[in-house]
Amino acid sequence: MLIPDTVRSLSVSAELVNYEDGQGSGMVAREWAASMIRRYKMSYVGPLDEGVRSELRALGPEFRPLFDMKESQLADWANETVRQLRIYPQIVTHDDLGWHIHYFEADTPLADRIRGSTAMAAMDVVQRSEARRLRVCTAEGCDNVFLDTTRNLSKIFCDPASCGNRMHGMRFRQRNRIREQQGPVQ
Ligand SMILES: [Zn+2]
Ligand SMILES: [Zn+2]
């Protein structure tokens, strides 16, 4: 299993990949960014101006391939990212998160903080032979990504309530169609 901080970091990465830019503005909405910071208890207190929000938006396409990568590719990406960011870890505690590791300074831009946490989480996943927990939704017409945190790696849909139900309904209708074509059972 994965440690909570790895799950937290990769859930942020998945949300950024799945973010839908309905208005095609090329940036994430301010409320969305603020809610992400709140929900994941990020310690970032800097601005959420247009520059910061377009950098966040750009993380989506950057992170998408990670959810469909071989272990060794994921390792290469993580190594390269950490090298570029010149990360050095600091163990800290804030909010009610308990001790966890920060990979950034107080003035590190938000996108680089997330990039760094994603890279370190990717290393953790590789180290634990858990890279296959990074998944793409198997539902038709959905390319959302997610982190499978189930014990037996049984999650196949990004959201069982939407994609799971939709696929279930589709299979149900297919079965009925086949039955109709075969005619009434004698
Ligand atoms: Zn923190
Ligand atoms: Zn889905």
Image: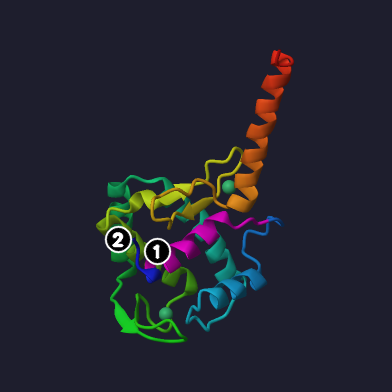
Closer to the camera in the image, 108 or 151: 151
Q: Residue furthest front?
A: 186
Q: Is residue 139 above or below residue 94?
A: above
Q: Secondary structure at mark 2?
A: helix
- The outermost residue toward the left is 127
Three-letter code, disc 1: Thr
Residue 152 sits inside the magenta stretch:
no
- Spot occupied by residue 64 in the image (x, y as percentages of width and height): 47, 51
Residue in the image at 73% along x and 14% along y: 183
User: Is the C terminus in the top left, top right, bottom left or bottom right quadrant?
Assistant: top right
Q: Compute the Cα span from label 1 to label 2.
A: 9 Å
Q: Position of residue 99 (x, y in %)?
A: 35, 82
Residue 118: assigned label? 1
Question: Is 60 on the left-hand or right-hand side of 122?
Answer: right
| Secondary element at image label 1 | helix
Looking at the image, which residue is at 28% across and 76% down? 88
Numbered label attached to residue 123:
2
